[in-house]
């Protein structure tokens, strides 16, 4: 990469494919920089995003290999179930711990770019739910880069842009179709002039960048970076430490999983859903077993004992039915929280 080239990092989730197509359609063939894209997709999905983006604009898009050298005028797309990271003039394609319940993670890409290239980074958040990308944009801004957000009115899902606008000092907010010319202009201007508030990476950021690449969070000292929280990781049940970024609190466990408040709420809510269904299943199994025991007793002529067991079966059945109603209600509330998270209201 030329010293004057920009690193453009773009994150999108639900509704983001259309936004990405609109963005890349406006990029010039002589873009002075490379573009890195993270789109949330299921880990077992087949990603055709490179083909889609290559057809949508003048630049070629590819899934990079771990260790590839960064080249200008190229779009690099995160493969499914792998973090896309920047390490000097090389690309990292790693299976570090999930962040905000996703791998690839937008925040992990943004943070690695900010850590390495600082004022040469342009961060872009597009359509999506919850708030992946907000922490990464905060890191980019903190280290002197430029922040860009899709106009929430233009986004199919506005939670990610809204959260970024609420928590980070955003330099530009505009429709996705207008972003290509803006990014081309910003890349021609060269590195951003670092503001008086721009800072150098700290130990916490160094650890988080390493963890995304597969580094051991516990061995690297994440537990000593900050205070323990009263919460546990919904993925591995490890202890979570609180990570402060301005007025925002995030969490990371000693095995490496990381969460914003919204992502942690979603993870805990899903864990509750799973637990409730497990208890419901267990109660229904008790009903079936009690009914079988009652039939065996009746066949042996032990009618009084069979009636006692059947009464217990009916009582357990009522509890299972009541719990199933509660479980379905909780599941509905969980879906509402994911569609409209508290921090995006």
Image: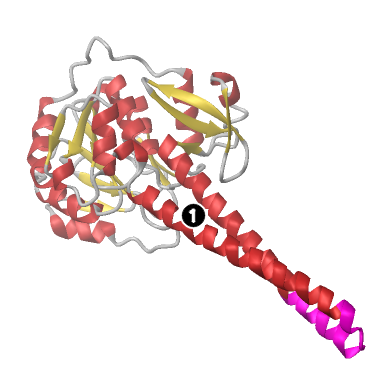
Picture coordinates of residue 256 (x, y %)?
54, 36
Q: Quadrant of the C terminus?
A: top left
At which x and y percent is residue 171? 17, 27
Which residue position is annotated with label 1?
Answer: 330
Residue 246 is situated, as x and y percent measured from the top left of the image, at 36, 20
Q: Is 287 displayed left or right of 326 in the figure? A: right
Q: Main secondary structure of the magenta part?
A: helix
Numbered-mark total: 1
Magenta region includes residue 302 = yes
Depth order, front residue of 300/259:
300
The reply, left or right, for residue 12 in relation to residue 305 is left
| Residue 329 located within the stretch drawn in magenta | no
Position above or below: 174 against 295: above
Q: Element at badge 1?
A: helix
Q: Identify which residue, 235 or 209, lies in the foreground.
A: 235
Magenta span covers which residues?
288-305
Residue 189 coordinates in the image, percent (x, y): 10, 26
């Amino acid at each position: 990469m030329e010293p004057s080239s920009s690193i453009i990092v773009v994150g999108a989730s639900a509704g983001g494919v259309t936004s990405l197509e609109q963005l890349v359609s406006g990029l010039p063939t002589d873009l002075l920089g490379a573009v890195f894209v993270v789109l949330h997709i299921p880990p077992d999905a087949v990603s055709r995003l490179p083909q889609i983006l290559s057809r949508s604009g003048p630049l070629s898009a590819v899934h990079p290999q771990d260790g590839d050298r960064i080249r200008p005028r190229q779009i690099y797309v995160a493969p499914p179930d792998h973090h896309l990271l920047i390490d000097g003039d090389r690309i990292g394609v790693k299976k570090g711990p999930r962040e905000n319940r996703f791998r690839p993670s937008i925040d992990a890409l943004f943070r690695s770019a900010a850590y390495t290239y600082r004022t040469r980074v342009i961060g872009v958040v597009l359509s999506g739910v919850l708030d992946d990308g907000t922490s990464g944009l905060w890191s980019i801004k903190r280290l002197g880069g430029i922040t860009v957000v899709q106009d929430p009115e233009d986004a199919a899902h506005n939670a990610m842009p809204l959260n970024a606008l609420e928590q980070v000092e955003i330099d530009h907010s505009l429709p996705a179709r207008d972003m290509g010319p803006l990014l081309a202009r910003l890349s021609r201007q060269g590195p951003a002039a670092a503001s008086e508030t721009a800072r150098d990476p700290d130990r916490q950021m160094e650890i988080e960048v390493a963890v995304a690449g597969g580094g051991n969070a516990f061995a690297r000292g994440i537990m000593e970076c900050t205070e323990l929280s009263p919460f546990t990781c919904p993925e591995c049940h490890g202890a979570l430490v609180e990570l402060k970024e301005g007025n925002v609190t995030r969490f990371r466990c000693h095995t490496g999983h990381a969460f914003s408040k919204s992502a942690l709420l979603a993870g805990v809510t899903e864990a509750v859903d799973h637990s409730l269904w497990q208890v419901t299943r267990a109660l229904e199994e008790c009903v079936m077993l009690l009914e079988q025991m009652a039939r065996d007793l009746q066949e042996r002529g032990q009618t009084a004992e069979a009636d006692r067991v059947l009464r217990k079966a009916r009582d357990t059945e009522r509890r299972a039915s009541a719990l199933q109603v509660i479980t379905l209600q909780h599941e509905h509330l969980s879906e509402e929280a994911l569609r409209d998270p508290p921090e995006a209201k």
